[in-house]
Image (cartoon, rainbow, N blue to C red):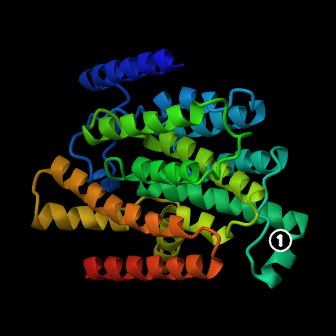
Amino acid sequence: MYYIFFAYIVLVLSLSVYFKKKEYFSNYSGDKHQLTTNENNIPLTGGIFLIIPTILINPNNFIFNFLLILIFLIGFFSDRKILKSPILRFVLQLIIILSCVIFLNLEILSSRIDFFDNILKNTYFNLFFTVFCLLILINGSNFIDGLNSLLISYLTIVIYILINLNFVPEIIYFENNLNYFFLFLLFLIVLNFNNLLMLGDAGAYLLSFFVGYLIIKSHNLYIDVSPYFFINLIWLPCFENLFSIIRKLLSKFSPLAPDSNHLHQLIFKLINRKIVKKKLIANNFSSILINCFNFLALYFVAIDPYNTIYQIKLTFLFIICYFLLFFFIKE
């Protein structure tokens, strides 16, 4: 397996350089929300390179891998501007995630709030709520994928924490493949920092879909762990999505349409205007700065995964920090 992994790394590096030189799979479409990129020919190939390693985590999980390919294809066609309608993308996501929840028996077992837990016992409500959570995660992850390595670094930290705490059930992965997958993500972070590739919609949908599945499976099997630990692991993309929807509705703007007022984009604009004029450096510096906070936040999350009160306090702290920073920069 080691030799296969190394050979794939060399292949991905070679193709990344080639695609960049030939300007294949270019990310630039002229949309206003793409102002955080420094060039117009960064290949949207992260998802293409991720699909095989993700499937190989557990090649025997045929249903999940089939759905994984479908969610990847939605993002791929979106990247290629073939699937332009955000409403159609959302409907297709809904169908795939609903299928995943039904056929793989995914469910949210507990919130540790008696009233809400009683509602969760209703099969249809649990189905709706689980699908809702996955949709929020996937689309929120796509929202924060606006700076080099921001999303991939965040989700890589999440995967590392789950592996380090032994919260990944053995039924999820085949032999040592999840560790190789983690190392491959680190490699993609380096390529992303150097503008040799971007995740694109395909990569964002694929990686967040896998992490969402991983977290729900872990939640189902490790019932002593606080559900708010798992919530805090993915708080940023989920909260970014929910806050973005509310913000756009209040501004009478379509929640499905992209914009450039996400927190990471505001931080980039501030740094690019006040500190670093070169976009690539400002982009990478903004991403590193945000990921330092994310790493620190998730470090504290991992300290006591069983303590619900502790985890809820962290949730409120993260949200307060987000609001303070957002409105301070916005002003």
In front: 214, or 27?
214
Q: Residue at x 39, y 39 (%)?
A: 186
Rendering quarter of residue 99: top right
Looking at the rendered structure, the number of numbered marks drawn on it comes to 1
The C terminus sits in image quarter:
bottom left
Asked if residue 204 shows in the view, the reply is: yes
- Disc 1 crowd rating (10 Å Cα; few below 14, some 14-19, many 20+) is many
Q: Which residue is mark 1?
A: 120
Relative side of 88 to 39, left or right = right
Please tell me whether residue 5 is drawn above or below residue 236 in the rendered image: above
Residue 311 position in % (x across, y down): 57, 76
Residue 246 position in % (x across, y down): 52, 76
Please tell me whether residue 32 is drawn above or below residue 316 in the rendered image: above
Residue 252 position in % (x across, y down): 48, 75
Asked if residue 261 shows in the view, the reply is: no
Q: Residue at x 86, y 78 (%)?
A: 118
The N terminus sits in image quarter:
top right
Relative side of 23 to 206, left or right = left
Amino acid carrying mark 1 in the image: Leu
Instruction: State the residue lying farthest toward the right.
Output: 122
Q: Secondary structure at mark 1?
A: helix
Q: Residue at x 29, y 32 (%)?
A: 196
Relative side of 320 to 19, left or right = right
Q: Residue at x 44, y 54 (%)?
A: 154
Please tell me whether residue 103 is drawn above or below residue 21 in the rendered image: below
Please tell me whether residue 57 is drawn above or below residue 308 in the rendered image: above
Residue 188 position in % (x across, y down): 38, 36
